Image (tube, helix red, strand yellow):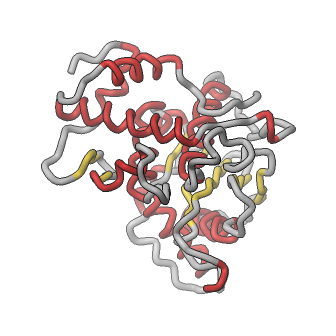
Amino acid sequence: MLVEEDHLWLSVIPAVRPGEAFLELKHSVVYNEDIPILKGIREDGWISDNVIAVAFELLGIWTSCNEKGVYLMNPTDARALCQIGIKDDQLSSHEDLSGLEKVRDSLMDKHWVFIPINDGYEQTFSDDEGFHGTHWCLLAIDLVLKKSYYIDSMATPLWKTAAYVDAGLQRLLGIREKFTYLKVKNTPKQGQQNDSATVDPGACGPFFYAVAATLVWHIICVEKNGRHWDLKMPGRPNQLRFDSFAVRNHLYRFMKLAKYVQTGDGWNPELADFMKGLSSFRTLCCLSD
């Protein structure tokens, strides 16, 4: 595929691999069974680890953020950090960091880490408090100012799980002084500030990706001249809105575009419009400086 200068990032997408996957990248894979969730034709609407992993890897390729001080973590590594954090809370002397050496090395030159958190990572809830593995939130960690931001589209006790992941990351990096842990309140809620709230029962996944993409692009724009951004949201939550179905559609088209780059099949006017839009597309929800 001939890649124009505006879309050189597409050349980073790896060659297609044989198998049953809808899309397989270097560190993640999404299967055909996951796609109906993105098309909005699955009743539950819950986005799987596979979709989050591919979405984050594509976001990293699109933004080249790894070269700009921002690390996007795979959900599998987030789950492993949670277990390390639990052992740290229990004052365990055992450190099983095997398998996370590459993550640790990748973080050495980073300013920011974005981590997907799922309520299935560890059961911080009792059995009578509902299902597990059905809600996503975001942990944004500022390694420069030593602040950890918990961002959630609902008022859930998932911040406890995120705190374990936060502790696990700090233990992985050998950081002894605990970071400031902040619950970000002024974020759009998947009920009140979601334009698709009445028809989307699983909006936390799209919300999680939308906020991550918005913050990553904002950090890249603010920090390109050497300035470090102290993360802050606007003063009133209703200043921020997002559309969970629009985000699902964005992810579906993004994966179709990556699949086209790999195979050369499936080009259509819809993808052409999507690709043009990516040149000027920087946020999925409104954000002030």
Residue 176: x and y in percent read 69, 67
Residue 113 seen from this side: no
User: In the rendered view, would you say 53 is above or below 16?
Assistant: below
Residue 161: x and y in percent read 64, 70
Find residue 238 and report its image quarter: top right
**In the displayed structure image, the side of residue 128 where residue 257 appears, left or right:** left
Residue 139: x and y in percent read 63, 55
- Placement of the N terminus among the 4 image quadrants: top left
Find residue 49 and report its image quarter: bottom left
Most foreground residue, 51 or 202: 202
Residue name at image x 46 percent, y 34 percent: 250
Most foreground residue, 214 or 22: 22
Residue 38: x and y in percent read 42, 45
User: In the rendered view, would you say 188 is above or below 98?
Assistant: above
User: In the rendered view, would you say 4 is above or below 218?
Assistant: above
Q: How many marks?
A: 0
- Placement of the C terminus among the 4 image quadrants: top right
**In the displayed structure image, the side of residue 108 where residue 20 appears, left or right:** left
In the image as oriented, which residue stretches furthest toward the top? 5
User: In the rendered view, would you say 126 is above or below 151?
Assistant: below
**In the displayed structure image, the side of residue 263 where residue 135 appears, left or right:** right
Find residue 103 and report its image quarter: bottom left
Residue name at image x 29 percent, y 45 percent: 25
Residue 190 seen from this side: yes
Residue name at image x 29 percent, y 53 percent: 31
